Image (cartoon, rainbow, N blue to C red):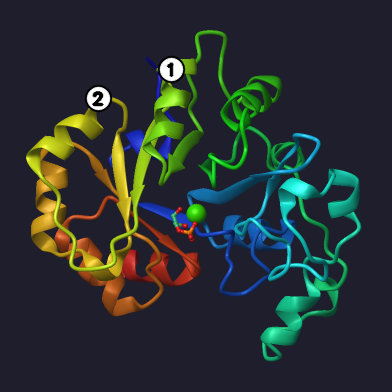
């Protein structure tokens, strides 16, 4: 299997531009993803929601309220309706010091548009969000991956990782295409622990785990790494935390500041 050019298999620490370089530009917009690339993030992180008419769009929340000038749930809106919304002005209002005229009137991108724009040379770290709300989401994702030749005829990919908090969703993807690399996300409310049994079970379908950084420690990371799993905590925005993650043996981080993480990596 030829994994050349695939950051995840290169034995390098991966820099995942969380929602794009979302510390600087409105999350999940083309400019945020472009900035992520320009700052040498290895992956563009994309959260997926699905419209009423079954199209996959890049958006974090189930509702459009926070990141657009519209209201309502994505599942109740058609793509045409969502395309009318402004996905950038909220960012300018919230971050006057980072505001840019060009963010006004940005549109919500579909997954297809992101693939069209960034092509097969870019790397994508794609999350199935709220899969229980969107029946058929995994099938649609695999269809789009196929249409844009992100997977080859044998089902292999060099540039896509699929992540989810939902084990069911990952298992579904795994069932549809066992060759796709998967990452199991976790959201811990208290200090995290993971058992040998859990790790054994995760290893059957996933190649890595992605927990919230603030609830893990070195022991957790060691256990994950001892099982040969990748460890990608989120969302690591502070230099000191980035260093800590590296000390613990993280194999990558999700960050809103890919430029800062690259600086830390260079000095490390
Ligand atoms: O996907 C990793 C991280 O982004 C998970 O949290 O809520 O930012 O999607 P969230
Ligand atoms: Ca995410």
Observer-nearest residue: 252 or 233?
A: 233
Observer-nearest residue: 210 or 41?
A: 210
In x, y percent, where is residue 194? 14, 49
Q: Which residue lies under the disc numbered 1? A: 175
Q: Secondary structure at mark 2?
A: loop
How dense is the environment of label 1, judged by Cα within 10 Å: few (below 14), some, or many (20 and up)? few
The residue lying at 33 percent from left, 37 percent from top is 10
The residue lying at 18 percent from left, 61 percent from top is 192
The residue lying at 24 percent from left, 55 percent from top is 250
> In what quadrant of the picture does the C terminus appear?
bottom left
**Which disc is residue 121 wearing?**
none
**Which disc is residue 204 wearing?**
2
Write down the quadrant of residue 264 in the picture.
Answer: bottom left
In x, y percent, where is residue 78? 85, 44
In x, y percent, where is residue 146? 64, 20
Q: Secondary structure at mark 1?
A: helix
In the displayed structure, would residue 255 be above or below residue 138? below
Q: Is the CB–ligand 1 distance for label 2 below 8 Å?
A: no
Write down the quadrant of residue 92 in the picture.
Answer: bottom right
Q: CA distance from mark 2 to mark 1?
A: 12 Å
């Amino acid at each position: 299997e030829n994994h050349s050019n695939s950051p995840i298999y290169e034995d390098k620490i991966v820099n995942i531009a969380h929602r794009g370089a979302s510390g600087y530009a409105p999350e999940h917009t083309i400019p945020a993803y472009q900035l992520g690339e320009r700052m040498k993030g290895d992956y563009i992180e994309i959260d997926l929601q699905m419209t009423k008419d079954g199209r996959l769009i890049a958006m974090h929340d189930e509702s459009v309220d926070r990141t657009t000038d519209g209201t309502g749930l994505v599942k109740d809106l058609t793509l045409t309706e969502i395309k009318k919304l402004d996905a950038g002005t909220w960012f300018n209002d919230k971050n006057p010091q980072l505001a840019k005229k060009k963010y006004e009137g940005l549109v919500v991108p579909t997954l297809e548009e992101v693939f069209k724009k960034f092509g097969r040379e870019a790397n994508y770290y794609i999350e199935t969000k709220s899969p229980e709300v969107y029946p058929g989401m995994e099938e649609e994702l695999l269809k789009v991956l196929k249409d844009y030749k992100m997977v080859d005829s044998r089902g292999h990919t060099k540039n896509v990782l699929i992540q989810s908090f939902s084990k069911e969703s990952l298992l579904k993807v795994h069932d549809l295409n066992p060759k796709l690399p998967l990452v199991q996300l976790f959201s811990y409310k208290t200090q995290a622990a993971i058992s040998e049994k859990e790790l054994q079970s995760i290893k059957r379908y996933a190649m890595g785990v992605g927990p919230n950084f603030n609830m893990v420690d070195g022991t957790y990371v060691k256990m994950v790494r001892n099982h040969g799993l990748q460890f990608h905590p989120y969302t690591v925005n502070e230099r000191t935390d980035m260093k800590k993650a590296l000390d613990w043996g993280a194999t990558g981080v999700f960050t809103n500041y890919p430029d800062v993480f690259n600086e830390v990596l260079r000095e490390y």
